[in-house]
Image (cartoon, helix red, strand yellow):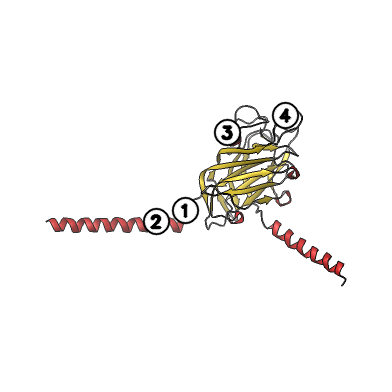
């Protein structure tokens, strides 16, 4: 085989390996939701089912810091803005083209799947968001982070913000890896309903065992992700709970035994 053909073949092998790797990165899950009156209305997240397990305890974004966000100046469309369905009940107020960190947190920090961050096609942003509790890895077999993207046609880059404030390795969620979330939304920014896709991400994929937040970012080639994110609230495993109960019981019995011995010594 000629050198040129060898190089081509090697390139195909590498591409195939990368394709397999990418396709295995973002997991699918089922979104259990309640859409009140069509794509423009309240669309509430009830629970998530993955690997035949259903969870409904979530941690939400409660703080956001904008590191960089292309602004709407009248000559361009800016980057990340807040957006929601035309007829939703929360958040209150109207969408904002140049949101504050508080605005970002308000639109992400709830179960309203029709309340999102809308990014213009060529806009760039870099935003740190923080959850209302620390997210820790466990042995449940479930992902810890769940994303939705209106349009199913954009990418999003994420990094873990560790408990010590440092960042993990950058991880790109690809539009080609999205799974159909089985619902549509119609927000004030667009003129018709669009399908929503989803990604599931584990802490292991981010190279961490716990995190307190995420760095979210997009570049011009990402095609403007319009997204929502929530985290699965960490709960102790049943075995861990039994272990804690056993420790507490043992400590109680030891204290009582010592108290009885002390009382006998004084009698």
Identify the residue position indicated by label 3 in the image: 102
Q: Is residue 252 at least partly visible in the picture?
A: yes
Q: Position of residue 260 (x, y in %)?
A: 20, 57
Residue shown at 41% from the left, 57% from the top: 242
Please report contact status of discs 1 and 3: CB closer than 8 Å, yes or no: no
Name the quadrant containing residue 36: top right
Name the quadrant containing residue 4: bottom right
Identify the residue position indicated by label 1 in the image: 236
Q: Position of residue 86 (x, y in %)?
A: 68, 30
Q: Identify which residue, 19 or 233, lies in the foreground.
A: 19
Pick whichever of labels 2 and 3 is earlier in the sequence.
Answer: 3
Identify the residue position indicated by label 4 in the image: 73
Q: How many marks?
A: 4
Identify the residue position indicated by label 2 in the image: 244
Pick whichever of labels 2 and 4 is earlier in the sequence.
Answer: 4
Q: Secondary structure at mark 4?
A: loop
Q: Secondary structure at mark 3?
A: helix
């Amino acid at each position: 085989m000629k050198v040129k053909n060898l190089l081509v073949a090697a390139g195909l092998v590498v591409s195939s390996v990368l394709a397999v790797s990418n396709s295995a990165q973002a997991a699918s899950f089922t979104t259990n939701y309640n859409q009140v009156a069509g794509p423009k209305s309240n669309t509430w997240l009830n629970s998530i089912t993955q690997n035949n397990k259903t969870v409904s305890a979530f941690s939400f974004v409660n703080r956001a810091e904008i590191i960089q966000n292309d602004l709407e100046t009248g000559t361009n469309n800016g980057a990340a803005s807040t957006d929601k369905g035309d007829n939703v009940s929360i958040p209150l107020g109207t969408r904002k083209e140049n949101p504050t960190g508080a605005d970002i947190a308000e639109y992400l920090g709830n179960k309203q799947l029709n309340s999102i961050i809308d990014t213009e096609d060529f806009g760039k942003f870099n935003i740190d968001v923080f959850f209302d509790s620390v997210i820790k890895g466990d042995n449940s077999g479930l992902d810890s982070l769940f994303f939705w993207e209106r349009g199913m046609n954009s990418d999003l880059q994420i990094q873990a913000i560790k408990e010590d404030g440092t960042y993990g390795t950058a991880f790109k969620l690809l539009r080609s890896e999205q799974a159909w979330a089985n619902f549509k939304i119609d927000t004030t920014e667009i003129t018709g309903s669009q399908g929503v896709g989803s990604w599931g991400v584990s802490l292991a994929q981010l190279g961490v065992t716990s995190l307190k937040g995420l760095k979210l970012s997009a570049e011009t080639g990402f095609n403007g992700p319009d997204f929502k994110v929530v985290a699965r609230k960490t709960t102790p495993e049943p075995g861990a709970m039994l272990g804690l109960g056993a420790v507490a019981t043992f400590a109680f019995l030891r204290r009582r035994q010592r108290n009885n011995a002390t009382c006998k010594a004084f009698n």
